[in-house]
Image (cartoon, grey):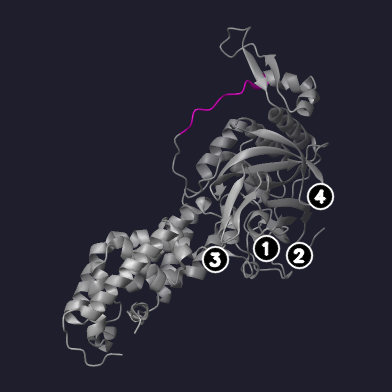
Amino acid sequence: MDEMQLIGDLRRDVPAITPDAAEAARTRLTASFEEPARPRSTRPRRRAPRLAWRVAVAGGSAAAIAAGGIVALSTGGEDGGGGGHVRAVTAAEVVLDRAAGAAASAPFTAPRPDQWVYQHIQSIDRLEARDQTSPQRGDSYRWTRASGDQVVDTGLDGVIGKPTHVSAFPPQSYASVAKLPVEPEALLRWVRSHRPATDRTTDFWALSRILQDGVLPPRLKATIFQAMKELPGVTVRKGVTDLRGRAAIAVVGQTSAAMGGVRLNEEVLLDPIAYTYRGEQTVLSADLRMRNKGAGVRVIKAGTVTGASVIVKVAIVDRPGRRS
Amino acid sequence: MPSAMPVSPQQSAGVDDAELIRRSWIDSECFATLFDRHHRAIHRYVARRLGTQAADDIVGETFLIAFRRRESYDLTHSQALPWLYSIATSLVARHRRDEVRYLRALRRTGVDPLPEPLADQITRRVAAQGQERRLAGALADLSRGDRDVLLLVAWGDLSYEETAEALSIPVGTVRSRLHRARRKVRKALGGGPSIHTPEEC
């Protein structure tokens, strides 16, 4: 008898996991989803002299965006020394400030507590980079009760599932987002202290997640864009096409996720004229070289979309299942 | 980051492991679906090495660690089992002395001392045959690296490539370790001490 077969027979009749043990292990896992965040060591952050560059935006820095470059201006200096202190305003800051302005001035009606927020989101369901095929699209429909206690999802088959409780982070109901701080530093502090301890994502990613919530108070939405300006390494990419083929501007931030060792960037997509929020996508930050069995090395280009979602429709409705 | 919506049970059916893990970045609950898919396989593998009691614990620990590392999962791998086996195997390593002790006891007494949850299962056990006892002794004598490769292939049903991935070693190393392990086991089975063997295949 072959020794591999003998080894394969050894302890073959070991008892399967009992339902109780499986349940205990599963509960251990799901309980960790909600562990409160431990205080994180705070990284040194640059403080943006906000006042100064508001002026720059008011002065119209379309040229800065068009050139993808930076505008330097005197800030007067925070140390009170005045003069000589020159600070660069990046294209990302200009774009984010416009997005904040657009968000703050958009018409808005808050849902009543008994109403539901309906969201239709289209997303990529297959990674282009993994399958070498065109990304497949999937549609998701979700109703979140404004008071915050229930969520209803439909599957791909269109069946409305049972209400489940909403998770703690990101906040998903209008009641929970309405309570968030509307000052950039305070919002960042809130994000860092409220996401689960197991959440190793970047601040940019966390903010991007809140943006995806259906209905946000205008001030909060504006604050999210302002808070993104405080984060290091945020840039702008132009000439981007969203999942539905529309032109968009991307605000690019880092994620802690990687694919084949190549870091992924998170891109918040904005309407290129109105600066309203469209959706998001993740892209490869550098070329990914993949070894295929017998097929040599395949190079997947930097910028390849590895996942994306766009908001197709958001509406405030009276009960789950209604779409308008 | 990509798909904004969580996977409801009816949506997860056609979704591969990598996609589930990607979605779990957004919605932790998707990771519970990964647990539902693979906890039995991981449990069985660990239970064969350390017994069901240790396996109960290690399964929970494996998925907890996996969840915390989910963002470092390489999404180009559609199947997550090699990754999960890799975590489980590193946890098994903490109990290496127990594993070797059980195998040596099986060789010595013919009775597998793996701790089991139910007392009546012990009475169902029959004394192992000579071949099985020699096999247990051979497994106990393997180096940890050789034993990991052999058992991931034999009990985890992993391919050489998947084993290499699970242990973070080159495929060539998997081949050479497996070759050496099999040779030692064959030698132990063929030329071991003459233990009484009622029936050989």
* A86 or A287, nearer to the observer: A287
Q: Which residue is mark 2?
A: A321
Q: Residues within 10 Å of mark 2 (few under 14, many from 20)?
A: some
Residue A121: percent from the left, percent from the top?
Answer: 73, 55
Q: Which residue is mark 4?
A: A245
Q: Which mark is residue A152?
A: 1
Q: Amino acid at mark 1?
A: Val
- The reply to the same-chain question for discs 3 and 4 is no
User: Disc 1 vs disc 3: which is toward the camera?
Assistant: 3
Residue A18: percent from the left, percent from the top?
Answer: 40, 76
Magenta stretch? A42-51
SS category of the residue bearing label 1: strand
Q: Chain of mark 1?
A: A
Q: Which residue is mark 3?
A: B33
Q: Is label 1 in contact with label 2 (beta carbons under 8 Å)?
A: yes
Along the horizontal axis of the image, is B130 left or right of A313?
Answer: left
User: Disc 2 vs disc 3: which is toward the camera?
Assistant: 3
SS category of the residue bearing label 3: helix
Q: Amino acid at mark 2?
A: Gly
